């Protein structure tokens, strides 16, 4: 059966949901989107969509920030998502992608509410990342500032930043990248939130660190219900993260990009001791620029369960 897409205010076969190559959204990245997960129940009889109402409300807010508009009210779009799942006869874990974009074929990057278009599709999707430990690097690309592209609007154009960081990570043998702010503080992954456990506390960068104040992130903080503490994370703090029996290996390494990470703030006179000294010796220098040393982030228990399965939504 051909997948059904919601496009141009109607349900239609995917082959009929087309956008011109002249579209401003394609040329300039003028749009915003949501990433929504649905999970099959244990008995296999239902799909539970994770905080659907909240995701649609945020998409509506994102569109308003970008001078765009949904093709209906939030409640109407919520009903469209449910109907889309029904028409596609979804029976397993699913990913739902609503996107609002500037569907104008005119030249020049201009946001115009009258050119707004809403499209929604869905596809089967299991874990975004493996539950097993993965190799992660701190990218030499810095997270785009909130004052340049609003992170909380989940704008499509901002994901070029994520794509560059992830490409650099994969080219250097890693699975994922962590981005820092221009000040050198931990922001988020290319498409994930960053959490660590230290001294019994759940730690995460604040939502003011040029990152998405994600619905998944907010939910994890509520679910933890124990002592947690939001901090302005820095690379040197991550070096001192608690070791867990299942650790996520994180190594800073300068990539091909000319703006290298360098050492963590205030660390030029300090040696960061880790239990992974062999990797310290194996790191290569990057010309005259110092490379940051390896580190390990705790990746166990609740954090392992949530972070290993979620995208930055």
Image (tube, rainbow, N blue to C red):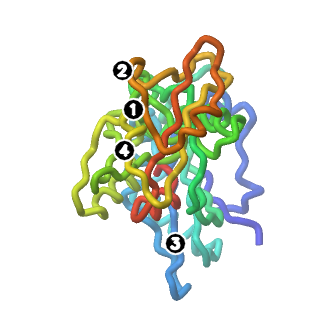
Question: Which of the two marks, 2 or 3, is nearer to us in this view?
Answer: 2
Q: Quadrant of residue 222?
A: bottom left
Q: Is residue 31 at all visible to an observer of this figure? A: no
Say whether disc 2 or disc 1 marks the residue closer to the N-terminus. Answer: 1
**Which residue: 75% across, 35% down?**
21
List x then y, in percent, for residue 43.
52, 88
Q: Is residue 32 left or right of residue 91?
A: left
Name the mark nearer the viewer: 3 or 1.
1
Q: Nearer the viewer, mark 1 or mark 4?
A: 1
**Label 3, label 1: how many angstroms apart (C-alpha)?**
37 Å
Q: Which residue is mark 4?
A: 213
Separation of marks 2 and 1 at Cα, in angstroms = 8 Å
Q: Earlier in the sequence, mark 2 or mark 3?
A: 3
Identify the residue under disc 3: 39
What residue is shown with label 1? 236
Q: Which residue is mark 2?
A: 266
């Amino acid at each position: 059966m051909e997948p059904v897409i919601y496009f141009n205010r109607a349900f239609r076969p995917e082959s009929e949901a087309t956008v011109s190559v002249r579209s401003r959204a394609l040329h300039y990245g003028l749009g915003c989107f949501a990433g929504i997960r649905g999970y099959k129940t244990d008995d296999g009889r239902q799909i539970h969509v994770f905080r659907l109402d909240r995701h649609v409300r945020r998409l509506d807010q994102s569109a308003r920030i970008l001078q765009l508009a949904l093709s209906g009210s939030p409640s109407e779009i919520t009903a469209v998502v449910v109907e889309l799942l029904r028409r596609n006869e979804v029976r397993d874990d699913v990913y739902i992608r609503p996107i609002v974009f500037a569907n104008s074929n005119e030249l020049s990057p201009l946001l115009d509410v009258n050119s707004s278009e809403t499209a929604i599709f869905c596809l089967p999707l299991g874990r975004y990342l493996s539950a097993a430990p993965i190799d992660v690097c701190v990218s030499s690309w810095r997270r785009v500032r909130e004052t340049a592209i609003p992170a909380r609007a989940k704008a499509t154009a901002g994901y070029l930043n994520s794509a560059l960081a992830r490409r650099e990570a994969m080219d250097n043998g890693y699975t994922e990248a962590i981005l820092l702010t221009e000040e050198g503080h931990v922001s988020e992954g290319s498409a994930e939130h960053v959490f660590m456990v230290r001294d019994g506390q759940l730690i995460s960068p604040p939502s003011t660190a040029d990152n998405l104040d994600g619905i998944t992130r907010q939910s994890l903080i509520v679910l933890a219900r124990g002592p947690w503490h939001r901090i302005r994370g820095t690379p040197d703090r991550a070096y001192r993260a608690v070791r867990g029996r299942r650790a996520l290996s994180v190594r800073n390494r300068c990539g091909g990009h000319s703006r290298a990470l360098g050492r963590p703030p205030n660390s030029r006179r300090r040696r960061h001791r880790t239990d992974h000294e062999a990797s310290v010796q194996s790191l290569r220098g990057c010309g005259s620029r110092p490379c940051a040393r390896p580190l390990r982030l705790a990746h166990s228990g609740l954090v392992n369960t949530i972070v290993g399965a979620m995208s930055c939504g």
